[in-house]
Amino acid sequence: MNVEKILNDLEKKHPGEVEYLQAVREVLESIKEVYEQNPQFESAAIIERLVEPDRILSFKVPWVDDQGKVQMNLGYRIQFNNAIGPYKGGLRFHPSVNLSILKFLGFEQIFKNALTTLPMGGSKGGSDFNAKGKSDGEVMRFCQSFMLELWRIIGPETDVPAGDIGVGGREIGFLYGMYRKLAHENTGVLTGKGRGWGGSLVRPEATGFGNVYFANEMLKTKGASFTGKTVCVSGFGNVAWGAVRKATELGGKVVTISGPDGYVYDPDGVKGEKIDYMLELRASNNDVVKPYADKYGVKFVAGRHPWEVKCDIALPCATQNELNKEDALALIKNGCTCVCEAANMPSTPEAIEVFHKAKILFAPGKAANAGGVATSGLEMSQNAMKLSWSAEEVDARLHQIMKDIHQQCVINGKQADGYVDYVKGANVAGFLKVANAMVDQGVI
Ligand code: NDP
Ligand code: 2IT
């Protein structure tokens, strides 16, 4: 496989889509060897068919603000691949959203969902809507207008959206209400629903919990655990909240959280009611984390990333490319031995190279944050059965799924010297499952 040629051709077709090309490059470089060992992939043109989405729906989202003024946003849904199950993936509402970002997320989602062991294809969607400073009524009218277009191409057996950045329980509620009215049916068409109307227990916590379960599996391979460890977390949203909770529960001390404005350093640890306060802060429709530092009288470092703080374990939980080469070098210098990505693609390729060279434990988001979508899959199962499981049952299944994903990474990523390349492991395991399904099902 000529990775450079494929990427050059893709760049000509999709100029400037840097995040998408970054995600494709990483996967192609990892799977090159296994691809070349399986000539049936080449004859079925698997790569050419896998790197392009099945279809992209792009639409406008007009809505009326509280002053009666008409506002306009852009909306998208990218259905990438459904070889192993219905399209499945989150919706992101953030002003930075564009096609490149949603394509990278949709592409990653294919392999992540394959790793969960559940039957889910990959998709992603969203809008450049900025919730900052908006009232609940404005968010509702925006969500309703968004669903007015989206509902045509989704369905419980077709494409099942969920949350991502800027889309939490409140937005899923507004989106679901509108879908129910338009489709005249009450089905599990979205996941992350409220507990009283088809949602699953543990889904809000699942990405962060799953991430910490995965990190714990990695630590176990070195005879280590979270107990007594200092942990740096970035972000202060849904995923960061779950990760902080579980890392603390397992005996770690989380000393940072962060926002686009900078990071908070809390040497006593983010714990107890301070974790609940993270939820309040996130729900305030502000994008600043500084109020945490003001409230608890701890240090706030403006405009910087938390990776300069000394820690044993780093859990990036904010967004793509938030951890660069300098950050990676600082982590290594300060003795960090485990970086477990909870966000999607938070480490730049140069940062990953630093981690691999230093031979520390490093897990990519598509493996280590799969607990969120896996629990969405469990929500779909419960909806299909019209039953709901207890929190203990969902959590036990989530825990087992994360252990299985870890195992798949070890099997496919172990190097001759025993070092586990979790990036390779995750990409190879996810790719093989999808590519084999595509070969089995013919050229469609
Ligand atoms: P939230 O909206 O709850 O929180 C996201 C956090 O990241 C906020 O602190 C947000 O600040 C910050 N952030 C977003 N964009 C930027 C940016 N461009 N620069 C700096 N900071 C930014 O989202 P989630 O916690 O759900 O998502 C966090 C990460 O986890 C994302 O990468 C997401 O794709 C990934 N993920 C989410 C899953 C889920 O189930 N929710 C599952 C698997 C992965 P602000 O928005 O205020 O700018
Ligand atoms: O990136 C992700 O895996 C998510 N945002 C969750 C997707 C889902 O369908 O639950």
Image (cartoon, helix red, strand yellow):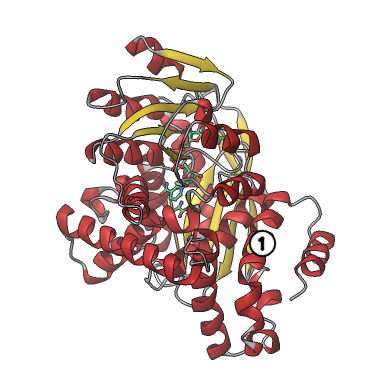
**Where residue 430 sits in the image (x, y, percent)?**
50, 70
Q: Quadrant of the C terminus?
A: bottom right
Q: Is residue 428 left or right of residue 230?
A: right
**Ligand 2 sits in quadrant:** bottom left
**Residue visible at 50% across and 50% down in the picture:** 91
The image quarter in which residue 14 lies: bottom right
Q: Quadrant of the N terminus?
A: bottom right
**Where residue 74 sits in the image (x, y, percent)?**
64, 45
Residue 83 in view, yes or no: no
| Mark 1 CB near ligand 2 (8 Å cut) | no
Per the image, the residue denoted by label 1 is: 24
Name the kind of residue labelled 1 in the image. Answer: Val
Residue 290, relative to residue 100: is it above or below?
A: above
Secondary structure of residue under mark 1? helix
User: Hey, which residue is sitting farthest front in the picture?
Assistant: 417
- Front-most of 426 and 153? 426
Residue 256, relative to residue 13: is it above or below?
A: above
- Front-most of 246 and 281? 246
**Where residue 86 sits in the image (x, y, percent)?**
45, 71
- Front-most of 25 and 16? 25
The image quarter in which residue 57 lies: bottom right
Tally the marks.
Answer: 1
For the residue carrying disc 1, how many other residues have a C-alpha within 10 Å: few (<14), some (14-19), or many (20+)?
many
Q: Is residue 143 left or right of residue 240?
A: right
**Residue visible at 47% across and 27% down in the picture:** 258
**Residue visible at 34% across and 12% down in the picture:** 295
**Where residue 5 sits in the image (x, y, percent)?**
82, 69
Residue 362 in view, yes or no: yes
